[in-house]
Image (cartoon, rainbow, N blue to C red):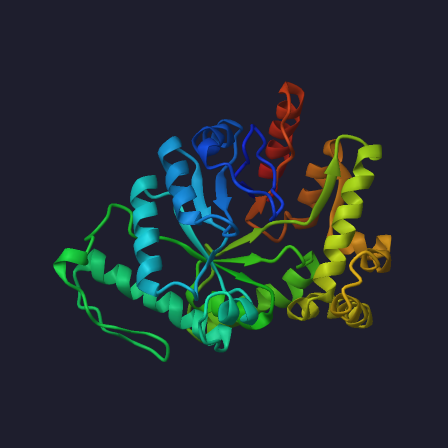
């Protein structure tokens, strides 16, 4: 299992940041070097409040070994050609260490935040990946660009705007997914799958991976080197007492995920449809403070890995080691003792099969 981390924030803290936390751009260079020194295999950047390609570019300049990627960048608000160019540049800067992670976002954001007409995301994402790869093929091989699809028609290339071939043209593409349809698309056209944190080991094993295999079989592909990259939902702390605060936070996260219709399949598989429907009503009524009380410990532990720093590595390894190739994980580093603990945790996860 490869161990990745989201970009650390503002201090020597390769931890997962909350979405509301702003990124300290001025610290990216030093933080990326710290992540590499700690022994991580990779570093991935979310698209929340900053352009992930810019952050990857800064990290690429600071590191020599670390794999870099977007986890994820939004596909549909960007033209495939724009995404192709951003990834091409990141691959050049990193000298072949970049992975393009793409996600769809939900309909409300695509239409009301980006002003783009919505369409069925599975077929749209399949065509999007094919279009990006067609542009890359044109640049690398000098072949004519003639991509014809429902959403995109790409057939114009002029020398002024053609970046030409690069030393490492095979850029992996990973797709974020929850439902089986997107997993199938990933099996058809992508190099990896990024399950949402709400996806449990049971859901990954019984729904997501079979769907990816079915998609690959449909187009005659093999998934021998297919990546499965999990950002696990965790509650961890130095000791049992401080762990309770983390558990409260994660309980609220599980309640929110359960209230989201897009994530319903991940709750149906565990017989929690009624709970999800109840929480959806509470969310609609904005009864946010009440929602975590509907998540008992059994449900919490189904969706989250809960343990102290001394135990979390072994628990994650047991939970995901047989299913995934990459895991995004960290703990805050405030002193040398914390750094030593994190290095041990990284070693534990890297030893997973």
Relative to 215, residue 24 above or below: above
Q: How many marks?
A: 0
Q: Nearer the viewer, residue 149 or 302?
A: 149
Which quadrant is home to the N terminus?
top right
- In the rendered image, which quarter is residue 302 located in? bottom right
Q: Residue at x 76, y 42 (%)?
A: 246
Which quadrant is home to the C terminus?
top right
Q: Position of residue 151 (x, y in %)?
A: 37, 76
Q: Nearer the viewer, residue 36 or 243?
A: 243
Q: Residue at x 32, y 59 (%)?
A: 82
Relative to 165, residue 241 above or below: above
Q: Residue at x 31, y 41 (%)?
A: 93
Is residue 352 visible in the rendered image? The answer is: yes
Q: Is residue 338 left or right of residue 184?
A: right
Q: Nearer the viewer, residue 198 or 169?
A: 198
Q: Position of residue 137 (x, y in %)?
A: 25, 61
Relative to 9, residue 341 above or below: above
Q: Residue at x 50, y 77 (%)?
A: 120
Q: Position of residue 144 (x, y in %)?
A: 17, 68
- Residue situated furthest left in the rendering: 159
- Residue situated furthest top in the rendering: 336
- Residue situated furthest bottom in the rendering: 150
Is residue 3 visible in the rendered image? The answer is: no
Q: Position of residue 242 (x, y in %)?
A: 80, 34
């Amino acid at each position: 299992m490869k161990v990745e981390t989201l970009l650390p924030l503002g201090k020597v803290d390769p931890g997962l940041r909350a979405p509301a936390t702003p990124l300290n751009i001025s610290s990216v260079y030093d933080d990326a070097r710290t992540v590499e020194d700690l022994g991580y295999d990779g570093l991935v950047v979310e698209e929340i409040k900053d352009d992930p390609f810019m952050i990857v570019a800064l990290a690429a300049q600071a590191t020599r070994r670390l794999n870099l990627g977007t986890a994820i960048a939004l596909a549909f608000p960007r033209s495939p050609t724009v995404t192709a160019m951003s990834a091409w540049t990141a691959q050049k800067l990193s000298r072949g260490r970049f992975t393009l992670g793409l996600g769809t976002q939900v309909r409300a954001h695509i239409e009301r935040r980006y002003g783009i007409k919505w369409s069925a995301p599975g077929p749209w994402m399949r065509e999007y990946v094919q279009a990006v790869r067609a542009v890359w093929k044109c640049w690398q091989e000098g072949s004519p660009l003639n991509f014809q699809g429902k959403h995109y028609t790409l057939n114009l290339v002029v020398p002024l705007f053609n970046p030409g071939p690069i030393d490492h043209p095979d850029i992996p593409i990973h797709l974020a997914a929850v439902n089986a349809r997107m997993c199938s698309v990933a099996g058809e056209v992508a190099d990896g799958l990024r399950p949402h944190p709400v996806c449990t080991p049971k859901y990954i094993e019984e729904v997501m991976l079979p769907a990816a295999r079915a998609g690959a079989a449909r187009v005659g592909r093999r998934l021998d080197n297919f990546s499965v990259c999990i950002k696990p939902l965790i509650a961890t702390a130095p000791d049992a007492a401080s762990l309770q605060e983390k558990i409260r936070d994660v309980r609220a996260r599980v309640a929110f995920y359960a209230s989201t219709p897009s994530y319903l399949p991940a709750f149906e598989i565990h017989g929690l449809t009624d709970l999800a429907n109840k929480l959806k009503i509470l969310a609609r009524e904005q009864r946010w403070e009440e929602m975590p009380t509907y998540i008992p410990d059994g449900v919490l532990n189904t969706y989250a890995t809960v343990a102290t720093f001394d135990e979390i590595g072994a628990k994650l390894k047991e939970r995901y080691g047989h299913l995934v190739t990459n895991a995004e994980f960290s703990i805050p580093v405030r002193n040398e003792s914390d750094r030593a603990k994190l290095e041990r945790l990284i070693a534990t996860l890297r030893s997973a099969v």
